Image (cartoon, helix red, strand yellow):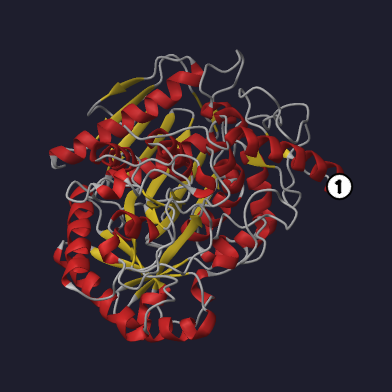
Amino acid sequence: MPIRTAGLSARARGVFVLAAVLLLAAVGFGVQRAAGGGDAGPGGGAGPAAAPAGPRTADRIVPAPLSATTGSGPGYRLTARTAVRTATGPDAPAQQAQEVRRIAGQLAEALRRPTGLPVEVVADGDAAADGIGLLLDPALPAETGAEGYRLTSDATGVRISARTPEGLYRGTQTLRQLLPPQIEGPAKAADGTEWTVAPVTVEDRPRYAYRGAMLDVARHFFTPAEVKGFIDRLALYKVNHLHLHLTDDQGWRIEIPSRPELTRVGAVSEVDGTPGGFYTAADYQEIVRYAQERYLTVVPEIDLPGHSNAVLASYPELDCTRSARPWPYTGIEVGFSTLCPTGDAVFAFTREVIAEVARLTPGPYLHIGGDEVKTISSAEYAGFVQQVNAQVLAAGKTPVGWNQAAPAGVGVLQYWDGRGGRDVELGQAAERGAKVIMSPSGRSYLDMKYEKSYPLGLVWAGTIDARHAYTWDPDNVLKLPAGSVIGIEAPLWTETLDTPYELDLMLLPRLPALAELGWSPKAALDWDGFKRRLAEEGARWDAAGYAYERRPEVPWPAR
């Protein structure tokens, strides 16, 4: 089982409360503490914002859909007769039919809890009958793609159709947003809540194929249950990749049976010296399974050859450059450590690690890091990355690297830092056919402070409020060949964050902003419209029990 202690949680939260109260007095904003979690939180207030009256119309959906047309009439009201009905057709593969039934079961459970209604699942029935129909329809236009869907609602029911189960799942997340915010609650809502879906037709599909968020579990460790909570928040906004930063100078977080010292030695600590932890194979596979059921692909990262102090403490023979610092290392400075850039021993090590992580990971990607290596030559660095790149390919995975790996021939590069000519190197790699995930640190890094006086996070890449996270175009950060950018990712580094509460504060409200950049058509992106839709998400987060920042640039409803 993974190791976890409260560590600094109580102290960090106490410091946060004091700082947030001072901020409230100085600049007039606070933190909305999750409803049902006890106190109103550091921001205080009179409780959750009231939900808008009447059915939630399509202009409230986040991320904004490709198109939405509001119909006429009373809409569909959930009652004791409501069922979730699936229709997959006789030609659908058995596995797809099973997936659709699973999605129906997830939706039914999500509806039962807050509504108190029975909401049965009727498999392979009439999707047009009274209730909520999930229809697998390969006749939909090809441009609908794997994640696109069509949702229609009228007085007779709600129907979601898609070419694949994944598309149906994305449609169910939109349906949740068309219901009152109390749909996200863990218990039955107050009597009298009107469970009505407004009449609407939604046609939807994503702008980018890759829409990710990264959780750093190396600087501070988070348990499988805590990672699952993170996944829940991503799935709500149609994010489809979870990048796990599993290794760094401060800790190694995944079990490798052939290298037991990695967890016996390298997993025992974290930033500030509190106990760390690691995932067994079973833990990791459970995270992967949970993510798959919500159509998120896990992208594991083993950061090489730098950020490797935990490895060097575990296997000192891999430290031919004498770059290791005394163990445990609990600071946040980086760039000092590196594995031996050459030699049979180091490549035997990387081969074993890559083979095991690839075996445990069903998704196509394996991230090899490659950033901030300052203690070996450029030629040694390139040779090392090329060797590891080949090992990942041999293990059947597509290598991904931070943009410093561009000269070494890695085919998928994650852009975060263009300093020192790295933007030119990335452009050259894209000209050679490399694909790019956009994560510019000054726009997408969720560990950056909202403003300089904010008590959590860092400021080395600037400050990022919700508007700053939203108002940029992934296609125009750099001048790259058309089609090079395959998507965006929002990294959340955890040097200053050690509880799920603190993760929430940095994640919300910025996650929906970045999710909309990845999903919605470019023509639909408009800050003034988005901030009004974002403001209404607060009531959903209250109901779900999520902490969030009531940022002043967002017009939250009055309390």
Q: Say whether residue 374 is left or right of residue 529.
A: left
Q: Amino acid at mark 1?
A: Ala
Quadrant of image for the N terminus: top left
Q: Residue at x 68, y 33 (%)?
A: 52
Q: Residue at x 55, y 34 (%)?
A: 198
SS state under label 1: helix
Q: Could you say which is closer to the camera, residue 337 or residue 17?
A: 337
Q: Is residue 387 among the parts visible in the rendering? A: yes
- Provide residue 119's location: percent of width, then percent of height: 39, 19
- Provide residue 308's location: percent of width, then percent of height: 37, 62
Residue under label 1, please give it: 26
Please say if 404 is above or below 65: below
Q: Residue at x 53, y 68 (%)?
A: 440
Please say if 53 is above or below 398: above
Q: Could you say which is closer to the camera, residue 409 or residue 93?
A: 409
> Local crowd at mark 1 within 10 Å, few (<14), some, or many (≥20)?
few
